[in-house]
Image: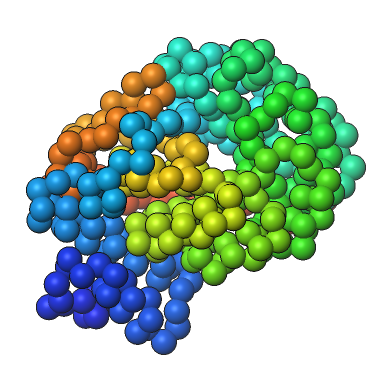
Amino acid sequence: EDLAPLLVGRDPREIERNWQILYRHPFFKGGAVTMSAISGIDQALWDISAKDLNVPLWRILGGLARDRVRMYDHLGGGNSDAVYNSDTVSSFEEKMKQSIKDGFTAVKILAVPQSAPLGDAAKLRHAGELMATARRAAGPDVDIMIDFHGRTTAAMAIQFAEVLAPYKPLFLEEIVPPDQHEALKRARAKITVPLATGERLLHRTEFLPLLEDGLIDVAQPDVCHAGGITELRKISALCDTYGVTMAPHNPLGPIATMVNVHLGLTTPNFLIQEVMRSDVSWRSEVFSGVPEIKDGHIYPPTSPGIGVEMDEKEAAKHPFVSGNPVQWFHNDGSVADW
C-alpha cells in the first residue's frame, strides 16, 4: 500500500527505473519489510516483461549460462519438524536415505543444536554423531551442507567446525548471527571448511564488507527479501568479482523456487539451489506449472514468464494462519539464537 502509488501509471517493463523509484523515493530506505515488498513487486515486473515478449524469464535475463540447475534437498524434504527437530541418529539416517532415493545429490542438514556460548561438550559430541550418520547414509559422493542457523558464538562455531570437517561438508552456513562481522572474522581465521551466509542480508552494500574481508565462499541472498531479481543480479555480479559463488536462500514456495531457477540458469557464478519440497497438501490446487525435479536438477522451462501460475480463487480458500513465534532459551533462562 505504501509503495503502490509510486508505480501507478508507469510502464511495468521499465524494471530498473521502477526499482530505483521503489528503493530511493521512500525517505527511510531499506529494512526487511520494505525490501521484501520491493522484492515481490520486482519479481512481478520481470514476469510481466517476459510474458509481454512471450518468452521464459531466463531468456530476458541474458539467456542460458548452463543447461540445468542443481537443487539440494532439506532433510525430511523441508518439513519444518524434520528440519529443526530431527535430532536423533535414526531419524537422520532414515531421512537422508529418502533424499538420496528421491534423486538428490546434495542435502542440507541442521546437525548443530542449540548450544551454550562456550564449553558444550555433549552438544559437540552429538553433532559429530549426527554428521557421521548422515555421511554413512549418503555415501562419500553426496554433498552435505550444514546450517548453523546463526545459533553459535564464534568460539563454539570453531569447535563445531573441527568436529564436522572430517566428514567433508560442502559448506557451513551462517555460523554466527549475521550482524556479528568481527565474530565471523575470528571464526573464519580458524575454519578451513567453506563458509556461506547472506539469507538475512538485504542489499549488495551489506555483502560488500564480507567480500572485501574474504569472509565467505558462498553467498545466499533471498530473492524474496533482498530486492528481488534486479538486486540479486547485482549481488551475483559483485560476488563474481571476488570469486564467490551463489546458493540463494529459498525456504519458500514454488514461485520463489522457479524465480531462483531462472536466476541459476543465467548466473555464471551460481553453485546450487535450495528447495523445500514438503509444504501443504493443497499446493497443486493453487499452483500450476511447477517443474519436476529430475535426478536432483531442474531444466530450463519453456512457458512465458516465471512459468508458475497461481489460482487466486483457490489461494483465497487458504488464508494466512499465524504460527507461534519461535523462542529459544539457554538452560539458565538466558535468551538464545534459534
> Could you say which is closer to the camera, residue 325 or residue 73?
73
Image quadrant assignment for residue 200? bottom right
Asked if 33 appears above or below 100 in the picture, the reply is below
Q: Is residue 116 visible to us here?
A: no
Q: Is residue 325 left or right of residue 33?
A: right
Residue at 57% from the left image edge and 62% from the top image edge: 207
Q: Is residue 272 left or right of residue 124?
A: left
Residue at 72% from the left image edge and 42% from the top image edge: 114
Q: Is residue 53 left or right of residue 291?
A: left
Asked if 248 appears above or below 39 in the picture, the reply is above
Residue 236 image position (x, y, % from top left): 47, 54
Q: Is residue 297 left or right of residue 86?
A: left
Residue 206 image position (x, y, % from top left): 57, 66
Q: Is residue 34 visible to us here?
A: yes
Image quadrant assignment for residue 67? top left
Residue 157 image position (x, y, % from top left): 78, 44
Q: Quadrant of the N terminus?
A: bottom left
Residue at 50% from the left image edge and 21% from the top image edge: 105
Residue 252 image position (x, y, % from top left): 39, 44
Asked if 249 appears above or below 6 in the picture, the reply is above
Residue at 77% from the left image edge and 63% from the top image edge: 182
Most distant residue in the bottom direction = 27
Number of callouts in the render? 0
Color encoding of the figure: rainbow
